[in-house]
């Protein structure tokens, strides 16, 4: 019943699009220059940000698509949209990614790397207090990052924290982060939802204390979260709202109805005909965020028959991508080319020919694979959004090409532990990550938690490591080109389309801007939105 | 009579004990290691082992069963594995939500259904009965989600009279609560009414063909009294059972309605907990559901016994 939608399983959730430009332009950006060769990411939302002046006051009710009794305020346990949104409302972060995925100052005012990007110096904002009145110290920040390395915390960001060797305060307002190997994207990394700034030594998050725009008024996991305005929030005059109330409405039709009837003001994940219903309604609008979130068919390359590269490539030619985009996604997405890089990214490899439905090529690969009439099973599930529809389209084309493709509809319950990575062919989905490198580390490294294809190659390992530490943009582009080409040719990933985030927002709600990391402004809107008077 | 109640009470207690064993065993054989699922995939084996010990999963099953059972008898449902909060606290709001919805639906639906069933039985074969039979048959065959969705589309989205979700904010007043509960209670009432009315018609209709009814009629008892007294008293036993089963369904089986109206009740909690392998919560829900069935059936049996003319006769005989 419950759509996990990748989010549930893909903690840390962030990815990509435009990767950060190199250090230099980042610094330029901080003084307000960078126009936007790398804009890419954004895309145009259907509702444009309001021009009117923000108004104080009012209460917003938000209906989320997932309901979980393991809702938490412990950022080390974050796994899904519900947690991210609650987190950005109650906690602050060192940096925040904007519409173009550029890191913007929050608690950190500015940052500076050493020459090889192994040591970063952050200037920290002064005069910030926690909601219980305590002053924010550098120790709090250090703890908030380093706790993810602790065994007993068992953090979902443990792997991403692996490269950080120390976080230390120097002087009253300077924080130094030391890295094991160079990372030019550290200011992006520190913006991930897990690095919520908490008080030093906090292990129990039953009564969360943060420095964010809201404080917790009531928290009933799986039922509701009521947040009240934090009167001591460090951003002058913010937040605009007095209260945010979050509830879950799991059924997509019921969720859209609640928006249309005015019972809630914002909902995540509009689906199917509900998109049109909201679009033509008088009180609701469709909020679209183009992104590189995706649903793909993956092959486990460490077992038969999915270790057969020709068979995998045959499947890649059996997807009618245009049809997936038009009928399954109703146009809310972009066509992809069997690797996780979005076409708007400056790193996109334009040399790789765009794959399309091609029965002749599919037949060629089928006969070369020697699979004959042997049954090939593809596991799909409601746990992976749209995978059932994509599977059915593929099955139809497979029949025309003479491949005996059978669909196995798996239960949503335990899909991510029992099916993904444990069957030859299966659907997976991912939210974007702020950088491609972060994504590759999580999903394509040898032994990585979400390397569901069990893909292993020395070449890939060294390319990922190099790209992380290469400051020269041209060189970095070459490395990413090669990574795309390896994934494209491996057949391990059949990625037909990137999915846009499609949410529903009442026309009264203003100030929301799309951030291509997730629903409703990249899960981060609490101190930005207001209600029209 | 008292002996009967005591005997049935003992049987009920024994049954609940068996149920508790089955619920516990059921949770034991659920696939997936609780500690592993709870910690997620970043957990090291050491962490998993530590949590297993913390949860007492390293101890033999029978020990854990008795601990759990004695806990329940003292009102302690244990702690949730995922949220670490006492299960009782997680249950409290949902239990009262579920009880509220079931109570409202029962109060509305049961009397209406009984009256409707009686009217149909009395007018058996007439146009009125035919129409009502077709309608109730149609409604009992209509899935709840369709009735619920149509209700939402009409009353919430089009007319804007009622909220689309039955969400109760803390501190809602009576009017708000009534508005929020109207659609889910109406949906459930339609489903439950259709079933009870049809059963009532069948039971009463059957009784009306019995010789003692014919005798009463021949002796000149007015038809209203024949149905209202002679037939109805004999129908109490079977009707009580039908009603009890329907109320039990309202407590445990309304997942669809809870989902469509985003009403935080027990059924949804149980599904979520199974997915999270939060066994203390699953066990608590299962026990509550089973206990509801067992206790309601017990009440129905007692009621049937009280109104059973034969048992009254026996009692009279013994006295005599």
Image (cartoon, coloured by chain):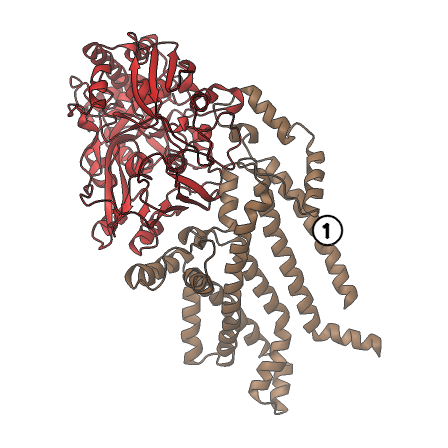
Chain colours: A red, B brown
Q: Residue A302 location, x and y as percent?
A: 40, 16
**Which structural element holds mark 1?**
helix
Q: Quadrant of residue A520?
A: top left
Q: Is residue A440 visible?
A: no
**As displayed, is residue B45 above or below residue B282?**
above
Between A511 and B43, the one lying in front of the other is A511
The residue at 48%/47% (across/down) is B268
Residue B124 position in % (x across, y down): 48, 79
Q: Position of residue B206 (x, y in %)?
A: 57, 74
Q: How many marks?
A: 1
Callout 1 crowding tier (Cα within 10 Å): few <14, some 14–19, many ≥20: few
| A150 shown above or below B261 | above
Where residue A173 appears, as percent x and y from the top left, is 37, 20
Q: Is residue A320 left or right of residue A404?
A: left
**Which of the image's four quarters has the N terminus of chain A?**
top left
Task: Write down the residue under mark 1.
Answer: B14
Residue B80 seen in the figure: yes
Relative to B118, does residue A118 appear above or below in the rendering?
above
Residue A256 vs residue A53, the one in the foreground: A53
Closer to us: A287 or A101 = A101
Which one is in front, B209 or A292?
A292
* Rendered position, A203 above or below A259: above
User: Which residue appears farthest toward the bottom when viewing the image?
Assistant: B220
Residue at 40% x, 60% y: name it: B142
Tag 1 subunit: B
Determine the residue positioned at 51% across, 23% down: B43
């Amino acid at each position: 019943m419950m759509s996990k939608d990748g989010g549930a399983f893909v903690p840390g959730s962030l990815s990509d699009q435009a990767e950060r430009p190199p250090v230099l332009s980042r610094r330029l950006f901080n003084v307000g220059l960078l126009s936007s060769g790398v804009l890419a990411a954004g895309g145009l939302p259907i509702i444009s940000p309001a021009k009117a002046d923000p108004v104080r006051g009012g209460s917003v009710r938000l209906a989320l698509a997932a309901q979980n009794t393991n809702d938490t305020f412990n950022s080390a346990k974050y796994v899904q949209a519900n947690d991210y949104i609650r987190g950005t409302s109650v906690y602050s972060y060192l940096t925040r990614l904007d519409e173009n995925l550029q890191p913007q100052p929050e608690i950190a005012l500015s940052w500076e790397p050493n020459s090889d990007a192994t040591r970063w110096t952050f200037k920290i904002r002064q005069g910030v207090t926690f909601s219980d009145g305590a002053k924010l110290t550098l120790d709090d920040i250090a703890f908030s990052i380093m706790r993810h390395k602790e065994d007993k915390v068992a953090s979902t960001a443990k792997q991403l924290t692996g490269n950080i060797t120390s976080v230390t305060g120097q002087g009253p307002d300077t924080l130094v982060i030391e890295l094991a190997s160079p990372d030019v994207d550290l200011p992006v990394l520190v913006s991930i939802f897990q690095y919520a700034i908490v008080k030093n030594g906090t292990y129990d998050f039953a009564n969360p204390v943060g420095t964010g725009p809201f404080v917790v008024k009531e928290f009933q996991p799986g039922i509701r979260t009521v947040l009240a305005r934090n009167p001591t929030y460090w951003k002058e005059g913010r937040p605009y709202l007095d209260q945010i109330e979050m509830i879950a409405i799991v059924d997509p039709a019921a969720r859209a109805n609640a928006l249309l009837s005015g019972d809630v003001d914002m909902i995540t994940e509009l689906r199917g005909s509900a998109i049109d219903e909201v679009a033509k309604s008088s009180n609701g609008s469709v909020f679209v965020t183009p992104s590189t979130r995706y649903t793909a068919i993956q092959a486990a390359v460490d077992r038969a028959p999915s270790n057969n590269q020709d068979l995998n490539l045959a499947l890649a030619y059996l997807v009618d991508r245009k049809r997936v985009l038009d009928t399954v996604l109703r146009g809310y997405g972009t066509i992809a080319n069997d690797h996780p890089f979005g076409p708007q990214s400056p790193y996109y490899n334009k040399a790789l020919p765009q794959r399309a439905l091609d029965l002749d090529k599919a037949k060629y690969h089928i006969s070369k694979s020697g699979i004959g009439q042997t049954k090939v099973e593809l596991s799909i599930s409601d746990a992976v959004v749209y995978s059932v529809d994509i599977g059915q389209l593929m099955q139809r084309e497979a029949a025309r090409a003479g491949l005996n493709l059978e669909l196995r509809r798996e239960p949503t319950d335990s899909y991510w532990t029992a099916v993904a990575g444990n069957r030859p062919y299966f659907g997976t989905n991912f939210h974007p990550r702020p950088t491609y490198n972060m994504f590759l580390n999580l999903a394509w490294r040898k032994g990585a938690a979400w390397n569901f294809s069990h893909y292993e190659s020395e070449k890939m390992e060294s390319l990922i490591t190099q790209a992380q530490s290469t400051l020269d943009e041209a060189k970095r582009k070459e490395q990413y080109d090669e990574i795309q080409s390896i994934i494209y040719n491996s057949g391990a990933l059949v990625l037909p389309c990137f999915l846009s985030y499609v949410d529903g927002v009442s026309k009264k709600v203003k100030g929301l801007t799309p951030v291509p990391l997730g629903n409703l402004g990249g899960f981060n809107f609490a101190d930005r939105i207001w209600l029209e008077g | 009579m008292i002996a009967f109640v005591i005997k049935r009470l003992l049987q009920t207690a024994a049954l609940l004990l068996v149920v508790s064993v089955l619920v516990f065993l059921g949770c034991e054989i659920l696939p997936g290691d609780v500690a592993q699922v709870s910690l997620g995939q970043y957990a090291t084996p050491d962490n998993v082992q530590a949590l297993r010990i913390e949860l007492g999963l390293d101890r033999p099953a029978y020990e854990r069963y008795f601990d759990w059972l004695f806990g329940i008898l003292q009102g302690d449902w244990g702690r949730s594995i995922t949220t670490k909060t006492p299960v009782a606290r997680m249950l409290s709001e949902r239990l009262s939500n579920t009880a509220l919805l079931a109570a409202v639906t029962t109060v509305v639906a049961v009397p209406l259904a009984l009256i409707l069933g009686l009217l149909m039985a009395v007018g058996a074969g007439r146009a009125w009965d035919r129409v009502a039979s077709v309608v109730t048959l149609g409604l009992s065959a209509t899935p709840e989600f369709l009735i619920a969705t149509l209700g939402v589309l009409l009353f919430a989205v089009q007319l804007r009279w009622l909220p689309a979700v039955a969400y109760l904010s803390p501190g809602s007043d009576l009017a708000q609560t009534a508005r929020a509960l109207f659609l889910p209670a109406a949906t459930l009432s339609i489903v439950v009414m259709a079933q009870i009315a049809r059963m009532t018609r069948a039971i009463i209709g059957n009784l009306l063909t019995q010789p003692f009814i014919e005798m009463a009629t021949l002796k000149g008892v007015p038809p209203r009294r024949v149905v209202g007294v002679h037939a109805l008293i004999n129908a109490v036993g079977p009707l009580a059972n039908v009603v009890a089963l329907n109320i039990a369904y309202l407590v445990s089986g309304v997942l669809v309605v809870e989902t469509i109206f985003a009403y935080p009740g027990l059924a949804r909690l149980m599904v979520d907990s199974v997915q999270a392998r939060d066994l203390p919560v699953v066990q608590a829900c299962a026990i509550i559901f089973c206990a509801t069935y067992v206790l309601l059936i017990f009440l129905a049996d007692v009621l049937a016994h009280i109104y059973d003319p034969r048992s009254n006769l026996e009692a009279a005989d013994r006295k005599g």
